[in-house]
Image (spheres, rainbow, N blue to C red):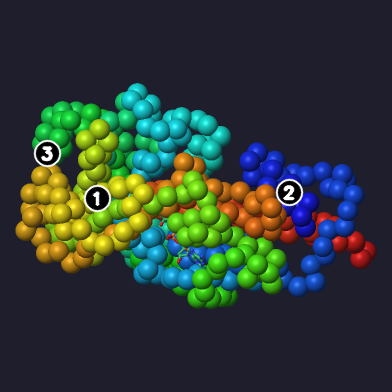
Amino acid sequence: MILVFKILSKSIHEGVATLQLSLAKLNMSLPIPKRKVQVAVIGAGAVGVSVGLNLLEKLSSNLVVSIISDEFSPRTVSDKAGAVIIPFDVRAKGKSEGKSNDDDTGHQLRVRKWTRETYRHLEDLYSSRFAEEVNIQLVHGYFGNQEDTVDPWWGRELVTGFRRVGDEEKAYKRIPLSIRNVFAFNTFILSGSDYLNWLMKRFQEKGGFLVKMKINNFHELSSYDIIINCTGLGASSLVQDPLLYPVRGDTVTILAPWIKEFFLLTNDEEDYVMYVFPRSADVLLGGSKVTNEWSKEINEETSSKIIKNCSSIIPSISNAAIVDYSVGLRPARKEIRFEVDAENPSLIHCYGHGGQGIVTHWGCALEVTEIIRNYIDLMHRRVPSKL
Ligand SMILES: Cc1cc2nc3c(=O)[nH]c(=O)nc-3n(C[C@H](O)[C@H](O)[C@H](O)COP(=O)(O)OP(=O)(O)OC[C@H]3O[C@@H](n4cnc5c(N)ncnc54)[C@H](O)[C@@H]3O)c2cc1C
């Protein structure tokens, strides 16, 4: 099993397509499964539950899957997400002037693949019988920043109706002229909680198990064959990852059914981030991005600033009923950690999605599933034929 996972680990870096292994070179006996493979997914956020669901949808005849988590919806970070499907945070090395999201490092290409697959999944969901339950919406709106002087790749490839917005339209929409690059397009918006509840329900319907438990050490899960670590920010204590850190996000939820357009505007030079995400039942206002802030206490000053910034774009927001104040900590990392553990080959890490966990979650889950499928195929191909 160790050798198999080492090969799979290598292949993660080279792309799943390279998983065509030369078994003839493996002069060893792979374990022959006498029972279903026991899989533990740690974490019940969007990443963990999608991994669990994908495994059951595609490999249930070979696997038993349990999601083990200290918190479930509505107490995960994924519940706090907007969640708008714009890959705005998916950049390779910092955000420098003149760079678009088109940077093409190896990691960036993987992130792009996960994003594409997630977008396609949401398109399917939007057209499916589940659309109402998930509360997924296709919304027109405006996205602006200082960095994307070149049109971003996803504008051409994923979203519909993508166009660059001129100063006249910016002024009409009350978008500050200091926001240099503004784009209009249609994309999907979800409520993190509604979506997570749907994923959880599907997972249970497919026979998945839920276990409420905090994991302090992977040895606690020694009865499982494979462990998938989807603990988000929790990985900072579980695996003591020094590269993982919180980025605090404050939001205010209002009732304003007349608002039908989204806005997401950022200006890092002025520490400005504002967003308005109309959802089926309410409108989520934001935001903030406070690096290395662990506190989840509501801050009145930040909440007032959010309402002020959003009202400057849509003045009627100042009269809307406020129904919730909330804080979530994004699990930020320079790069998402998605790899087989170097010391423990039956452990796969998939955490550190920052502000893009909803945008990428399904693609990550598909890739985890491919890795496990190949692992099972390898085992089966080693079983001596009875013919
Ligand atoms: C205000 C805000 C707005 C956002 N907006 C967007 C957006 O518009 N689009 C987007 O793509 N993303 C957005 N995000 C980011 C997104 O929410 C995250 O990237 C995503 O939720 C991460 O999902 P996850 O499953 O990795 O982590 P989480 O949702 O944090 O789940 C981690 C799970 O692991 C469990 N866990 C942790 N440690 C342990 C342990 N030791 N033992 C057992 N269980 C453990 C936790 O209880 C939890 O269930 C936003 C985030 C915030 C805060």
Q: Considering only vertical position in the picture, is 76 above or below 331?
A: below
Q: Which comes sooner in the sequence, label 1 or label 3?
A: 3
**Which residue type carries mark 1?**
Gly
**What mark, if any, has residue 174 been given in the picture?**
3
Q: How many marks?
A: 3
Q: Quadrant where the N terminus lies?
A: bottom right
Determine the residue located farthest toward the right in the rendered image. 387
Query: Residue 62, how many percent across, how many down?
Result: 70, 67
Q: CA distance from mark 1 to mark 3?
A: 18 Å
| 10 Å crowding of disc 2: few (<14), some (14-19), many (20+) | some
* Secondary structure state at the residue bearing disc 1: loop
* Residue shown at the point (21%, 54%) measured from the top left: 285
* Residue shown at the point (50%, 30%) measured from the top left: 104
* Residue shown at the point (35%, 66%) measured from the top left: 194
**What mark, if any, has residue 347 been given in the picture?**
none
Mark in front: 2 vs 3: 2
Query: Residue 373, how many percent across, how many down?
Result: 68, 57
Residue 58 horizontal side relative to residue 319, left or right: right
* Residue shown at the point (36%, 40%) measured from the top left: 88
* Secondary structure state at the residue bearing disc 2: helix
- The image quadrant where one finds ligand 1 is bottom left
Q: Nearer the viewer, residue 128 or 375?
A: 375
Q: Which comes sooner in the sequence, label 2 or label 1?
A: 2
Query: Residue 80, how many percent across, how many down?
Result: 33, 60
| 10 Å crowding of disc 1: few (<14), some (14-19), many (20+) | many
Residue labelled 1 has its Cβ within 8 Å of some atom of ligand 1: yes
Query: Residue 31, how many percent across, how many down?
Result: 82, 62
Q: Considering only vertical position in the picture, is 340 above or below 72?
A: above
| Residue at the spot of label 1 | 287
Q: Which comes sooner in the sequence, label 2 or label 3?
A: 2
| Residue at the spot of label 2 | 6
Q: Nearer the viewer, residue 53 or 158?
A: 53
